[in-house]
Amino acid sequence: MKVATPNVDQSQPVKAPLKPLDIVSKGWSWLFLLVLVIFFSIFGQGFLNVYNFQTIGADMALVLIIALGETFVIISGGIDLSTGFVMGMASVAAALVMSNLGGRAPLPVVVLAGAAAGLGIGLIPGLINGVIIARLRVPSFIVTLGMYGIARGAGFILSGGQPVSININGVGQIGNGYLLYLLPDGRVSFFHLPSDLQGVRPSQIIQLIPFPLIFLVIVVLISAWLLSQTRFGRHTYAVGGSEEASRRAGIPVVRHTILIYMLSALLASLAGVLYTMRFSNGAADVGDPLLLTSIAAVIIGGASLFGGEGTILGTVIGALIIAIIQNGLIFLGINPFWQFIAVGAVIILAVLVDQTKKQLA
Amino acid sequence: MKADVQPILQVKEIYKRFGGLVAVDHVSLDIYPGEVVGLLGDNGAGKSTLIKMISGAYKPDGGQILIDGQAVSFATPLEARRRGIETIYQDLALCENLDASANIFLGRERMRHQLGILRVLSRSYMLRESRQVLDQLDIRIPELRSPIRQLSGGQRQAVSIARAVYWKARLMIMDEPTAALGVPEQLKVLELIRTLRSQGVPVILISHNMQDVFAVADRAIVMRRGSKAGEVKISDSTDNEVVSLMVGAEYTREIKQLHDAPEEVRITTHDESEKDIS
């Protein structure tokens, strides 16, 4: 994100030196990630492989996108429990619009209209969460727990209780496509496979950089910029540090809190739209298993549930740790149910490390 | 006093009641540039109600507040701040998870342009300006980028004061600024108040620690039961005179006796009288 631009105030950018304690406290998650990768590379046949890493990246995209919004909420001192079902509701809305428009409008219109419907409907629960939390001062845990149920019900009502599948060729291609295809005869193709592929076995084609990963990187970079470089990000930390001090300093705390919950809902809806494009269907409960995983990623990433602390980079590492545990255990041939136990243990470990760090500081 | 100088703050016959209780009863006072004024009074004497009206937290039921000779009326503390009345609260009003410079610029962040259209925080500008204002007040903070949670109580107090100075406070109100601090830090804060005075920023110091008031104040305004019991020039008065103003005539005779008592006794009872005020 660092681009050399002429500074308006002619300031010299100063790099903050890292202090030893920071390295230990921020570094443990990096170290843990590295240990996991080395461990699975040695003991898991086929783990250390570009394809597998691409799969990890594409699979963690949805969880991480939800976790990015949750990072803002948790730093501001709140929690959003409704993201999973907001994602499901958005996926249903996107799937309904796409399947109804399919064939009757050009593909880009179908996709954009579906995405707009998903994101638009997802903003409504975010707005309601924010207004009730910020204006009526009801704890975020309660409000978003209520919205968890409301979004769940609304999603099922919208979909008629059944998953809404879409049967449009192009949509799946966007959701599952790759940026680069290397063909065995040396040809390179961008965005889609050439149609003349007689005699080429699928395993001979090298596919690089899946689209979900590209979406993910863009959303991560924008979130990191928003949190670390803008006034919006600074005020998010301030509100999480002390709401009273923020108010006295003239920060519009109510408006800011509403915007944070809308951002969380928007990112959850984006995950829902991406789900629909990847799996060519939408269902009310697709986000349910992602909610706790996404919160776990934020916590493993070093954010404090008391607010005021956390980074996007931390959340990314947290999500990577979870994704690599889930993926690596498969390569070890271990019963996949062990992944829940492993991830659960890591969450507790992360909070323990955080507490020890605070005692040392 | 200083008839030719315009007072920064003038309070005229200000009045506030809560139900049947008259909390502040027609109090008037003037604050001039570069003076430190102690505001003293027993619990319930009306000190904080008076201060809350000046800082915009309460709306007066009567009377007038003038800044630089101009009548003002504040709906919120934020409006008072915009007119240059900064209140340093006991609980500091800082975000402990942010660093000193982020706190000094809290809510008034300096932005710069990125790629022509994006507006981002100008960290280096804010850091430089913060360092400058801290230097100007002779405040030493070892690491400007560490969260102020890691600073001592006195240093945090100093950050609050530096913020007020940076944003060109016309008048600083400090509510018990030394209450939660150790002795060396108390001295540091008193030193800071002297620095403010030398830079022309008047300070209203609310304290029940009379030593503090006698150490730094030029004048003391004494409140009793909602009214102004008196106003003394610190250099011309003794703490006993001030105490009798605070507690009223019924106790004055006892205090007089204490005053006439032998030295040892006087010192111990002096301590007691301080406790009474607290």
Image (spheres, grey):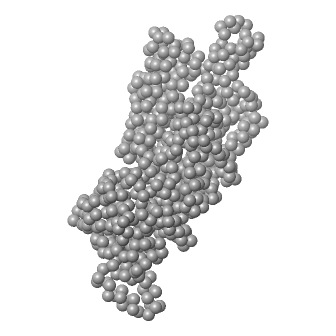
Give me the residue at 47% from left, 72% from top: B216
Seen in the picture, residue B2 relative to A121 is either above or below; the reply is below
Residue B96 appears at what percent x and percent y? 53, 55
- Which residue sits furthest front? B4
Residue A342 in the image: x percent, y percent?
Answer: 64, 41
The residue shown at (33%, 58%) is B69
Task: Give above or below for B193 relative to A179.
Answer: below
A57 left or right, relative to B173: right
Count of numbered badges drawn on the protein = 0
Q: Is residue B181 visible?
A: no
As drawn, the residue found furthest toward the left would be: B20
Residue A290, image x, y percentages: 54, 34
Quarter of the image with the N terminus of chain B is: bottom left
Residue B129 horizontal side relative to residue A113, left or right:
right
Quarter of the image for residue A45 reads top right
Q: Residue at x 42, y 86 (%)?
A: B269
Left or right of A254 in this view: A27: right
**The C terminus of chain B sits in image quarter:** bottom left
Q: Is residue A61 left or right of residue A118?
A: right
Can residue B236 be seen here?
yes
* Coordinates of residue A238 in the picture (x, y in percent): 50, 48
> Residue at the location (41% across, 70% down)?
B38
Along the line of sight, which residue is nearer the eye, B63 or B101? B63
Q: Quadrant of residue B270?
A: bottom left
Q: Is residue B62 above or below residue A339?
A: below
